[in-house]
Image (spheres, helix red, strand yellow):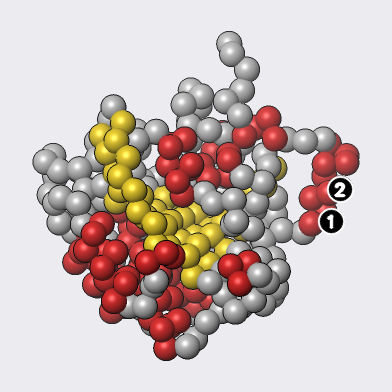
C-alpha cells in the first residue's frame, strides 16, 4: 500500500507558493540520489510551473547497461491549484498527486532493496496558481505553459511505454468512482486495450476492469480547433512509444478546478496499479500492444503519424 505516501505528498502540494524544493528534499531523504532527480522552473506568457522528473534505475535497466525496457509514468494535469480564484488542491491535481505518491513509494522500496528489473521514469509538473478555462460539461484547469512545453519536459526518449495519469472527472463518458484505462495509442493508431493491463487492474482493484472510449480527436495535438476529451493522451503526439491513459474518474461530472474532490483511497488504488504494471513490464510480462498486429496495420493501411501533427492549414 501507499496511503502514507499519498498523505505526505498531499500535505506538500496542498499549499500556495512553490513546494518543489520541499518535494525534492523528501525524495532525497527517501533514498533518491540527486543525479536521478531533475527539476526546472519554466515561465511563459500564461504563467510558470516547476517540472520534476525522477528516475529509478532497475537491476537490468538501461541506466546500468541492461536491455530491459523502461516504463514512463506521467502525471498529466493543468495545475494543482487555481489560487487566488479558489483555495486548495483542485480535482485536476490528482494526476500529479498520483505520480508523485507512486514515486515516493518506489523510492522507499528501492532504499529497502526492493528494486525492479527495468528503469522507471516518473515526471510531472507543479503549479499551485494555474488559470481556469471554459469547457463543457464543466470547466477545466488551464495550462500555465504550452502543452508542447509540457511534453518536452515530461516525455523522455528513454520511455519504451507510457502511462499517462490524469484526472478525468469532468465528463459523462465514464461514470465510475475509481480509475479507468484507455486503449493503447501508438503513432496515430488507436489500438486494442491491453489484456495484460486489464488483468493487473482487476488484481489491484478486486473488481472487473473499467475502460473509457477515445476518439481520433483525442489523440491529436491541442490547439488544432478540435474537441478533446481532455489532455490525457497528449504525450502520444510526441513519441513512437505506446501510450495508455489512466483516468481518475467519478460517477458524476466534477469540474477540474473544484476543490475537495481528491480521494486518498482512489489515489492509492491507482498508485498500486502503476507499481504493479512497472514490476510486470520490467519482467516482460505486460505488453501494451501486439507488435505483429501493429506492423500488419501499417502494411495494410499505411502510417497514421500525420495525426501526431497539427494537420493541414484550412
63, above or below 293, in the image:
below
Query: Is residue 196 rendered to the left or right of residue 268?
Result: right
Q: Quadrant of the N terminus?
A: bottom left
Considering the numbered disc 2 on the image, is that residue within a helix, a strand or a loop? helix
Q: Are marks 1 and 2 in contact (CB under 8 Å)?
A: yes
Residue sitting at x 51%, y 24%: 224
Other-residue count near label 1 (Cα within 10 Å), few / some / many at <14 / 14–19 / ≥20 = few
Query: Is residue 234 rendered to the left or right of residue 78?
Result: right
Considering the numbered disc 1 on the image, is that residue within a helix, a strand or a loop? helix
Q: Which residue is more in the foreground, 274 or 107?
A: 107
Residue identified by numbered label 2: 296
Q: Quadrant of the C terminus?
A: top right
Where is residue 217, by image quadrant? top right
Q: Which residue is more in the foreground, 138 or 113?
A: 113
Q: How many marks?
A: 2
Residue sitting at x 45%, y 81%: 110
Residue 301 locus on image (x, y percent): 83, 36
Q: Residue furthest top?
A: 314
Residue sitting at x 68%, y 42%: 187
88, above or below 203, in the image:
above
Residue 248 locus on image (x, y percent): 41, 58
Where is residue 99, by image quadrant? bottom left
Other-residue count near label 2 (Cα within 10 Å), few / some / many at <14 / 14–19 / ≥20 = few
Residue identified by numbered label 1: 292
Amino acid at each position: 500500500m501507499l496511503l502514507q505516501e499519498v498523505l505526505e505528498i498531499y500535505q506538500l502540494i496542498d499549499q500556495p507558493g512553490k513546494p518543489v524544493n520541499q518535494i525534492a528534499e523528501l525524495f532525497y531523504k527517501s533514498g533518491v540520489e540527486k543525479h536521478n532527480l531533475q527539476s526546472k522552473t519554466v515561465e511563459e506568457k500564461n504563467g510558470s510551473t516547476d517540472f520534476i522528473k525522477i528516475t529509478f534505475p532497475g537491476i537490468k535497466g538501461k541506466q546500468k547497461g541492461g536491455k530491459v525496457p523502461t516504463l514512463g509514468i506521467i502525471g498529466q494535469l493543468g495545475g494543482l491549484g487555481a489560487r487566488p480564484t479558489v483555495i486548495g488542491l483542485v480535482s485536476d491535481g490528482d494526476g500529479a498527486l498520483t505520480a508523485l505518491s507512486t514515486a515516493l513509494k518506489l523510492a522507499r522500496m528501492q532504499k529497502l532493496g526492493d528494486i525492479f528489473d527495468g528503469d522507471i521514469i516518473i515526471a510531472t509538473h507543479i503549479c499551485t496558481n494555474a488559470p481556469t478555462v471554459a469547457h463543457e460539461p464543466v470547466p477545466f484547469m488551464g495550462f500555465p505553459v504550452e502543452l508542447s512545453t509540457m511534453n518536452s519536459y515530461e516525455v523522455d526518449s528513454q520511455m519504451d511505454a507510457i502511462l499517462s495519469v490524469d484526472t478525468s472527472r469532468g465528463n459523462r463518458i465514464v461514470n465510475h468512482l475509481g480509475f479507468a484505462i484507455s486503449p493503447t495509442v501508438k503513432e496515430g493508431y488507436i489500438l486494442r486495450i491491453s489484456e495484460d493491463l486489464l488483468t493487473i487492474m482487476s488484481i489491484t482493484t478486486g473488481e472487473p476492469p473499467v475502460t473509457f472510449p477515445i476518439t481520433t480527436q483525442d489523440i491529436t495535438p491541442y490547439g488544432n480547433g478540435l474537441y478533446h476529451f481532455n489532455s490525457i493522451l497528449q504525450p502520444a503526439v510526441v513519441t513512437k512509444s505506446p501510450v495508455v491513459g489512466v483516468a481518475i474518474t467519478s460517477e458524476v461530472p466534477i469540474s477540474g478546478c473544484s476543490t475537495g474532490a481528491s480521494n486518498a483511497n482512489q489515489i492509492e488504488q491507482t498508485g498500486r496499479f502503476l507499481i504493479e504494471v512497472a514490476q510486470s513490464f520490467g519482467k516482460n510480462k505486460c505488453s501494451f500492444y501486439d507488435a505483429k498486429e501493429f506492423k500488419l496495420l501499417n502494411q495494410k493501411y499505411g502510417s497514421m503519424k500525420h495525426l501526431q501533427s497539427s494537420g493541414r492549414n484550412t
